[in-house]
Image (cartoon, rainbow, N blue to C red):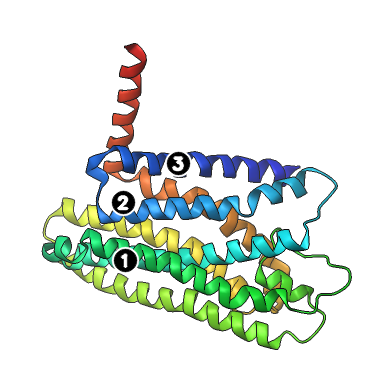
């Protein structure tokens, strides 16, 4: 019951936070920039990501029946893995957007034009579909043990690999390669971009400009650290002792906690989002009075 309350509260905060960001982006013309376009995509992705697993998780935490059908497990795996892979690529795209904004400010509008932004958004969702279509069928074909007890909160690859009684080397190698592509690759590229961003920030003469660039980059780094580190620990070596013992709680962290913290991290220190939210509240008050 403690977990049920914990997950319920975080899920409700996620729904409200993500919906607010999406609403502000569509209502406020000042937020029609590449950064907020990708932030809106992240909000949509996180809404789908959490909804693909948390409702079933709450059902299992609430009552004595802690089961899920084979079809339900397969559907959850396909959607969960695809959205997780897409989020990895989206965080990399957002890092690229910040790199251009800080290191190439004069060419930002020419580089990050709407056509390119829509192409990158398509790449994000297509990469998620590709990732899940490569790994999920292999995982669902594993020879599962007869007890069918998934040691985890959701049907994800590491938990299902641990459920298998036969040879899982191919599936383990496959998920490690996919983990390297979708986790380690983006982390490396993001760290390289952070180095260039740090050099550019230190070269900014204006204290206000330097402070704004630092706030934006530090918020993104916080989200990256929370998501990538927990996911990497689970997916790179799914059969490891650490992954089996602590993996389910790390899954709970990047499934429940991280999507809740994302809107708070991105918006609490963001002047544009605060002003847009205040305008929305002011508009609602005016409508209520009239």
Badge 2 or badge 3: first in the primary sequence: 3
Quadrant (top left, top right, bottom left, bottom right) of the N terminus: top right
Q: CA distance from mark 3 to mark 1?
A: 24 Å
Specify which label sits upstream in the sequence, 3 or 1. Answer: 3
Question: For this view, does 37 lie left or right of residue 152?
Answer: left
Callout 1 environment at 10 Å: few (<14), some (14 to 19), or many (20+)? Answer: few
In space, the residues marked 2 and 3 are separated at their CA atoms by: 14 Å
Residue that numbered label 2 is attached to: 36
- Whole-percent x, y for residue 286 in the image: 30, 18
- Single out the mark in the foreground, 1 or 2: 1
Q: How many marks?
A: 3
Residue 201 is at least partly visible in this image: no
Instruction: Locate residue 64 relative to residue 53 in the image: left or right.
Output: right
Report which quarter residue 96 is drawn in.
Answer: bottom left
Label 1: state its secondary structure: helix
Mark 1 vs 2: CB contact within 8 A: no
Residue at 52 percent across and 62 percent down: it is: 83
At mark 2, the secondary structure is: helix
Other-residue count near label 3 (Cα within 10 Å), few / some / many at <14 / 14–19 / ≥20: some
Name the residue at 70% across, 79% down. Answer: 239
- Residue 19, numbered label: 3
Q: What distance separates the C-alpha of mark 1 from that of mark 2? A: 16 Å
Residue 97 in which image quadrant: bottom left
Say which quadrant the C terminus sits in.
top left
Q: What residue is pinned by disc 1?
A: 119
- Can residue 252 be seen in this snapshot? yes
Q: Is residue 8 above or below residue 73?
A: above
Image vertical order of residue 9 relative to residue 185, above or below: above
Helix, strand or loop at label 3? It is: helix
x then y, percent, for residue 208: 17, 50
């Amino acid at each position: 019951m403690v977990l049920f309350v914990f997950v319920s509260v975080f899920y409700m905060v996620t729904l409200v936070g993500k919906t607010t960001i999406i609403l502000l982006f569509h209502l406020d013309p000042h937020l029609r920039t590449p950064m907020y376009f990708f932030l809106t995509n992240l909000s949509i992705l996180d809404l789908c990501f959490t909804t693909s697993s948390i409702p079933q998780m709450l059902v299992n935490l609430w009552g004595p029946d802690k089961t899920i059908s084979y079809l339900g497990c397969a559907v959850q795996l396909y959607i969960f893995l695809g959205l997780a892979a897409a989020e990895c690529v989206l965080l990399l795209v957002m890092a690229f957007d910040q790199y251009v904004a800080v290191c190439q400010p004069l060419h930002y509008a020419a580089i990050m034009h709407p056509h390119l932004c829509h192409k990158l958004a398509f790449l994000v969702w297509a990469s998620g579909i590709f990732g899940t279509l490569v790994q999920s069928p292999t995982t669902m074909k594993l020879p599962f043990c007869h007890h069918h007890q998934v040691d985890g909160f959701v049907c994800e690859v590491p938990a299902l690999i641990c459920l298998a009684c036969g040879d899982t080397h191919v599936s383990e190698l496959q998920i490690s390669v996919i983990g390297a592509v979708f986790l380690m690759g983006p982390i490396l590229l993001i760290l390289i971009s952070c180095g260039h961003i740090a050099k550019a920030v230190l070269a900014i003469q204006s204290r206000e400009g330097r402070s704004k660039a630092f706030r934006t980059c530090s918020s993104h780094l916080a989200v990256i650290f929370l998501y990538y580190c927990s996911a990497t620990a689970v997916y790179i070596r799914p059969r490891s002792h650490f992954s089996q013992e602590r993996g389910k709680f790390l899954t709970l962290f990047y499934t429940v906690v991280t999507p809740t913290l994302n809107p708070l991290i991105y918006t609490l220190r963001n002047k544009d989002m605060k002003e847009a939210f205040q305008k929305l509240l002011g508009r609602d008050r005016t409508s209520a009075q009239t």
